[in-house]
Amino acid sequence: MTSHHQQPANHSRQESPGLPHLSQDGYIRLAYQTFRQLEMTCLYSGMDDDRPVTSGLGASATSITGFTEWASHGIPAITIGWDWKLAGTDGKPCLFQTGIPGRNLMFIDQHGQDLGIEQTTAILIDWLKTFDWQTETMSNLSC
Amino acid sequence: MNIISGTADSLQGIYREQAAYRQKVFIENLGWDLHAPDGLEKDQFDRPDTYYVVARDEEGAVCGCARMLPTTHPYLLSEVFPQLMNGAIPPSSPEIWELSRFAAVDLNSADPSPLRQMSSEVAISLLQAAIDFAAQHGVKRLITVSPLGVERLLRNAGFRSHRAGPPMRINGHLIFASWIEIEEK
């Protein structure tokens, strides 16, 4: 499995694209290809205890949402967390990522330049479609 | 809504009201293991040089608070939660302040959930006021220690922030440290 991240653009830092390294601003800067080689583990998952309740007469009040937290091994660790909602697909319950993932990761290009917050976020959201985080998250919920 | 900022000395009675508000929110509502002698939640970081940003509703009741500490002196993250820094040394700089005890809960609301109210307009206004107050003092970045739910506020409201490290479960609560960049205006 893999991971990613983001932050302010215009940060140019020449850092070795090897193991995670913590920048002074708190970001771990990595190329996406390097990130993909790292193993990410599910740390915590949970359901929101503050999930919104639909109001109104006769309205259904079933909106199950939650969060899941993943991190790489060792220190410094890459941390990524995102929200999910439970919805049915073809009669089967499934988790869908929602919102903007939280992270300490900033992707860099081949020149070591930050890709910026928006692009890093977009890559991260795409990355979430590349592996089955849902099974692990649901398993985590039942622990 | 009215937002006021200052030290305990300058805020006088409002300081006590925010301490009582903290007791209700963090101890009674969120169940944090904190001290509240005489019904006032405070710790060793509530010092004469500590700044507070306090929101009050139309009736004058406190509906939000934030505590701000320079990182050049001991602060919550450096003394109690350095493990949240992902191996980095907690910052010490006149340009970095710590934001802690952030809450925006209307205790008179029918909605009992403090975390849900973190996305309220009060929460956003309070955080923006805290950022503006820090900026007026030459601060460039904030470092926070917060429940994980605060990250939703930061992300959804468009604040420029990122995690300092992974969240950790401490005393049953998921908390994390986050950087908030103060943009120049």
Image: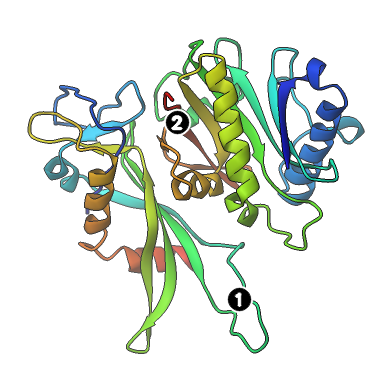
- Reply above or below: B123 against B16: below
Label 1, label 2: how far apart the Cα atoms are: 34 Å
Q: Position of residue B14 (x, y in %)?
A: 83, 29
B101 to the left or right of A96 = right
At 61% from the left and 14% from the top, the residue drawn is: B74
Q: Which mark is residue B179?
A: 2
Question: Label 1 is found on which chain of the structure?
Answer: A
Q: Amino acid at mark 1?
A: Thr
Residue at 23%, 32% (x, y): give it.
A29
**Chain under numbered label 2:** B
Which of the 4 image quadrants contains residue A130? bottom left
Q: On the same chain: label 1 and label 2?
A: no
Q: Residues within 10 Å of mark 1 (few under 14, many from 20)?
A: few
Q: Quadrant of residue A25?
A: top left
Element under disc 2: strand
Give left or right: position of B47 versus B97.
right
In the rendered image, residue B147, in percent from the top left (x then y), is placed at: 57, 43
Camera-side residue of B11 and B91:
B11
Quick one: A139 or B27, which is closer to the camera? B27
Q: Position of residue A85 (x, y in %)?
A: 44, 69
Q: Is residue A110 above or below residue B59?
A: above
Crowdedness of circle 2 by 10 Å Cα count: few (<14), some, many (20+)? many
Q: Is residue B150 above or below residue A106?
A: below
Please say whether residue B77 is visible from this viewpoint.
no
Q: Is residue B28 left or right of residue B126?
A: right
Q: Is residue B8 visible?
A: yes
The answer to whether the residue labelled 1 contacts the one labelled 2, judged by CB atoms less than 8 Å apart, is no
Q: Which mark is residue A38?
A: none
Identify which residue is drawn at 23% across, 63% down. A129
Residue A54 image label: 1
